[in-house]
Image (tube, rainbow, N blue to C red):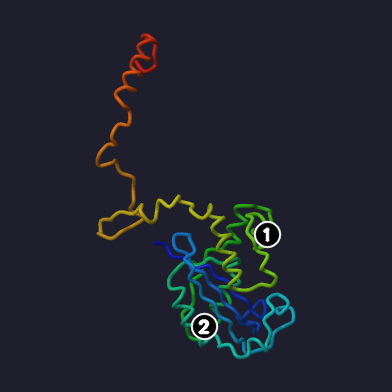
Amino acid sequence: MMREIVLDTETTGLDPFEGHRIVEIGAVELYNHMPTGRTWHQYVNPARDMPPEAFAVHGLGEEFLRDKPLFAEIGPKFLEFIGDAPLVIHNAAFDMKFLNAELGWCDLSPLPMSRAIDTLIMARQKYPGAPASLDALCRRFGIDNTARTLHGALLDSEILAEVYLELIGGRQPDFALSAGQGTKQGKSGGNSAENWRPTPRPRPLAPRLTEAERAAHEEFVAAMGEGAIWRR
């Protein structure tokens, strides 16, 4: 089973090293490229003012965030939820920079950039020259984002999960051959989707042709003479 986490953050600005902080984190769990329904969501008190330009993006003001926990309080819970799963993020460099800054300020281990799957890069590679914003990709794939009047980390993660599944070929890019009933025991004795391979049937299927149908076919071929393709 392959677990992935689709992730988004909202912040007070563009650079954590200019004093900006995370104010919201949303995450959606996928197993084998399918949403499980399990999510993680947290508003965060940035312990600073909210610039008007940031408020215009996500609508999270100082008064609303004042009683929310600091990142130091929720950081361990966030790491516990994501575990060691790959992180699917739109414009991953931005979110990873903020997450690692916040984790570092709490003396928590940073997240390697190698864990990030950047859907912005995927979209630009798949559709060169085309708009690659989340809204543009929703239009391209016919994904309903009418609820997205403002940016919100959990809503954007849920929408991004749908976009990601389209970018990799739809909800079941491997036709489900790597999951569920298509698994068999590997050499180690455990069930492994990666070890599954098609094998011959242990018993051939019983013939579905009746004797009467077989005789009729033979008569039909005989009437065509020696040139019948079935005799070659």
Residue 209: quadrant of the picture: top left
Q: Quadrant of the C terminus?
A: top left
Residue placed most toward the observer, 142 or 222: 222
Closest to the observer: 37 or 28? 37
Q: Residue at image x 60%, y 52%? A: 126
Q: Identity of the amino acid at label 2? A: Gly
Residue 19 vs residue 116: left or right?
right
Question: Which quadrant holds residue 101?
Answer: bottom right
Residue 212 percent coordinates (x, y)? 31, 22
Q: Residue at x 48, y 86 (%)?
A: 107
**Mark 2 burial class by Cα count in 10 Å: few <14, some 14-19, many 20+:** some
Q: Position of residue 90 (x, y in %)?
A: 59, 65
Q: Using the image as rendered, state which of residue 59 and residue 104 is in the foreground.
A: 59
Question: Eyeballing the image, is 113 above or below 15?
Answer: above
Q: Nearer the viewer, mark 1 or mark 2?
A: 1
For label 2, the SS is helix
Residue at the disc numbered 2: 104
Q: Are marks 1 and 2 in contact (CB under 8 Å)?
A: no
In the displayed structure, 199 sits above or below 227; it is below
Residue type beneath disc 1: Ala
Which quadrant is the N terminus positioned in? Answer: bottom left
Q: Is residue 77 above or below residue 141?
A: below
Residue 142 placed where, x, y %? 64, 55
Q: What is the crowding at mark 1: few (fewer than 14 residues within 10 Å), some, or many (at least 20)?
A: few
User: Which residue in the structure is indicated by mark 1?
Assistant: 136
Residue 89 lies, in percent from the top left, at 56, 67
